[in-house]
Image (tube, grey):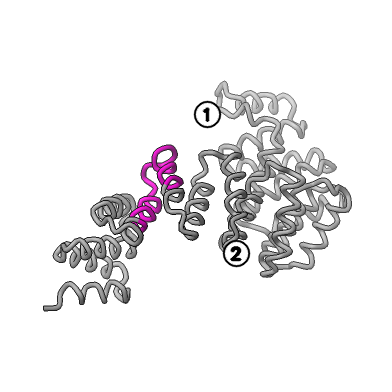
């Protein structure tokens, strides 16, 4: 859960950055120096107005969009140098440092922003995320509750509060906060994803609706379709699960190995269609040959299809990747015994 939480926190930091950028629609490919892109034009303007903080901030956002984090940080530092009262600058540079993987300068800038304006909800939310990241839950709750008190209509504080409860393994409260987040913001994709996972863990079919909400917001999200497929598979809705995996392959990513694997598993275990299972496990192995389970299940499919020589080779491949894989060890014994 900790690894997944870090991914979610980082993604939310990116969302925070992107939604604040005033230049998102102007991102272009550029070559520096002396180019004609927007970055080049801003650079020319900076030469003529070197003390203009807004120009540095605008260029920093464009550098960030290109994932030029060092250049983005440098420009935002200059923006702060020329306008130390603008909390947006402190908030954004803290995002850049977090994404760069260094929370210490992020906290320093956020502390300055909080001192500038203790009622800035964007700063409070970032401080809450930061303390969540380092497992200081009391501080996380403190800042997120301040943000909620200032503006009860905001969705993000409730989402962060839900993450905090999630990390504390208080599932019921986490769910309530995620639900509040989507009530405040019906377009909150990440909250729907987590609600889908939470209800899937409970074997509650409400997971289906939350996954549908996520899919409606991002129709080409592998994550949302895959989560839906896994849940449908877990409750025995195999045809519907197949449809989700097939949608991923046909419409999003034809090389997505896990979708082929899951379809192969259903043909192997639930339909006893071994030729089809073999076909799908072979495709899964083609796009990801590093999974011992894929080679094992391909071997099992061959074994059940009365092709012991091929099954033996697949079990051996599985054991090359994981020598102590007991299922493959047992499979190899079955096909080699006389």
Q: Nearer the viewer, residue 42 or 332?
A: 332
Which residue occupies 66% across, 37% down?
A: 61
Q: Position of residue 313 (x, y in %)?
A: 18, 64
- In the picture, measured across the screen, residue 9 lies left or right of residue 318, that is right
**SS state under label 2:** loop
140 w.r.t. 332: above or below: above
State which quadrant residue 201 falls in.
Answer: bottom right
- In the picture, measured across the screen, residue 291 lies left or right of residue 66, that is left
Q: Nearer the viewer, residue 181 or 236?
A: 236
Q: Position of residue 337 (x, y in %)?
A: 14, 78
Q: Which residue is mark 2?
A: 202
209 w.r.t. 51: above or below: below
- In the picture, measured across the screen, residue 255 lies left or right of residue 187, that is left
158 w.r.t. 186: above or below: below
Q: Position of residue 21 (x, y in %)?
A: 69, 35
**SS state under label 1:** loop
Which residue occupies 29% across, 50% down?
A: 283
Q: Residues within 10 Å of mark 2 (few under 14, many from 20)?
A: few
> Where the N terminus falls, by quadrant?
bottom right
Q: Which residues are magenta?
A: 243-266
Who comes first in sequence, dot 2 or dot 1? 1
What whole-number distance in Å separates the C-alpha atoms at marks 2 and 1? Answer: 47 Å
Q: Nearer the viewer, residue 113 or 287?
A: 287
Q: Which residue is mark 1?
A: 29
Q: Residue furthest left?
A: 338
């Amino acid at each position: 859960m900790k690894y997944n939480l870090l991914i979610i926190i980082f993604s939310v930091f990116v969302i925070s950055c992107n939604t604040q950028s005033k230049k998102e629609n102007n991102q272009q490919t550029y070559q520096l120096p002396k180019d004609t892109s927007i970055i080049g034009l801003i650079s020319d303007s900076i030469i003529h107005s070197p003390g203009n903080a807004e120009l540095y901030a605008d260029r920093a956002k464009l550098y960030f969009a290109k994932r030029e984090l060092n250049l983005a940080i440098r420009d935002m530092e200059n923006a702060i140098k020329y306008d130390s009262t603008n909390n947006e600058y402190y908030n954004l540079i803290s995002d850049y440092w977090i994404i760069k993987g260094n929370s210490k300068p992020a906290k320093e800038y956020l502390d300055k922003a909080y001192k500038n304006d203790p009622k800035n909800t964007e700063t409070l939310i970032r401080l809450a995320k930061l303390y969540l990241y380092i497992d200081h839950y009391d501080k996380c709750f403190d800042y997120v509750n301040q943000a909620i008190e200032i503006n009860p209509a905001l969705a993000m504080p409730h989402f962060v509060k839900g993450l905090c409860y999630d990390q504390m393994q208080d599932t019921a409260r986490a769910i309530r906060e995620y639900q509040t987040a989507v009530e405040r913001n019906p377009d909150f994709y990440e909250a729907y994803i987590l609600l889908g996972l939470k209800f899937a863990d409970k074997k509650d079919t409400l997971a289906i609706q939350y996954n549908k909400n996520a899919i409606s917001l991002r129709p080409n999200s592998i994550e949302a379709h895959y989560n839906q497929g896994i849940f449908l598979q877990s409750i025995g809705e195999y045809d519907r699960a197949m449809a989700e995996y097939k949608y991923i392959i046909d419409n999003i990513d034809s090389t997505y190995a896990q979708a082929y694997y899951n379809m192969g598993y259903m043909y192997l275990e639930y339909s006893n269609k071994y030729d089809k299972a073999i076909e799908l496990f072979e495709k899964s192995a083609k796009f990801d040959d590093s999974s011992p389970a894929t080679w094992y299940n391909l071997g099992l499919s061959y074994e059940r299809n009365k092709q012991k020589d091929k099954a033996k080779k697949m079990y051996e491949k599985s054991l090359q990747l994981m020598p102590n894989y007991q299922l493959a060890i047992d499979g190899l014994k079955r096909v080699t015994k006389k």
